[in-house]
Image (cartoon, grey):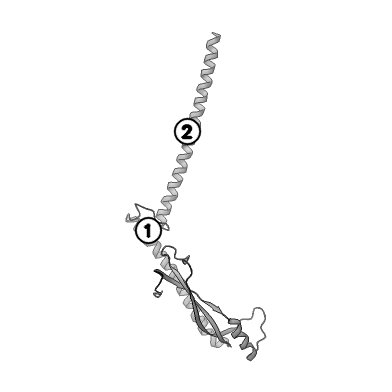
Amino acid sequence: MSDLGEYNGRPIVGTGIIIRNTGDGLSKAMTVDPRDLTIGDQVYVLLEATCVDMHYPVEDPKYPAIGGVRRIPVLSAGTATFIDEADASAAIQRQKEREREHADKVSGQVTISMAILAAEHDDGKHAKKRVPGCEPCDEEARLEAAEADAAREAAAIADAEAAAEHADDEVAAARGRRGGKRG
């Protein structure tokens, strides 16, 4: 991923796009080159656009740990034209391949990040405070919670047994008092 800079001191970790006024350019194209389109038809459109605004949404949910934002350019569509599949297919195929490669790379980055967290954990760097997203830290938290639940349950059982024993003692004492009066 290229360095996209910062916005208000926060790293820009991704981009997106908004395209406005697309209907205007396509409607003009349809008056010059009318097409009888039906549901399911696949067409290729070449679009001229101008960047007219920029949005910086709140934190990117894919990168909550670093508090990154996404930069979203807003484009205003200009002229649009239909192009033949033959002219578009090579570019479309290249883009699909690039998207697959990027997805594989990002997936690998996540795996590497998790491995780094696990190594830091093993080195004792998480001893003072657990790190969210670190699998060993998360597992320790789950085990600790399970142990605490088990301890609470054992204490509740011990309290119930003590109460039952106390009740038995009370019953025995009451029987002894009654027995003593008869004697």
- Residue 179 is situated, as x and y percent measured from the top left of the image, at 54, 12
* Residue that carries the numbered disc 2 in the rendered image: 158
Q: Quadrant of residue 107?
A: bottom left
Give yes or no for contact between labels 1 and 2 (Cβ–Cβ under 8 Å): no
**CA distance separating discs 1 and 2:** 39 Å
Residue at image position (49%, 35%) is 157
SS type, badge 2: helix
- Residue 155 is situated, as x and y percent measured from the top left of the image, at 46, 36
- Residue 29 is situated, as x and y percent measured from the top left of the image, at 61, 88
Above or below, 28 against 142 in this view is: below
For this view, does 28 lie left or right of residue 101? right
Q: Residue furthest top?
A: 183
Q: What residue type is disc 1 on?
A: Ala
- Residue 23 is situated, as x and y percent measured from the top left of the image, at 61, 82
Above or below, 180 against 54 in this view is: above
Q: Residues within 10 Å of mark 2 (few under 14, many from 20)?
A: few
Q: Residues within 10 Å of mark 1 (few under 14, many from 20)?
A: some
Query: Looking at the image, which is closer to me, 76 or 63?
Result: 76
Above or below, 133 against 48 in this view is: above
Image mark for residue 11: none
Residue at image position (54%, 79%) is 19
Q: What residue type is disc 2 on?
A: Ala
Q: Residue furthest bottom?
A: 32
Mark nearer the N terminus (1 vs 2) = 1
Q: Which quadrant holds the N terminus?
A: bottom left
Residue at image position (63%, 91%) is 32
* Residue that carries the numbered disc 1 in the rendered image: 118
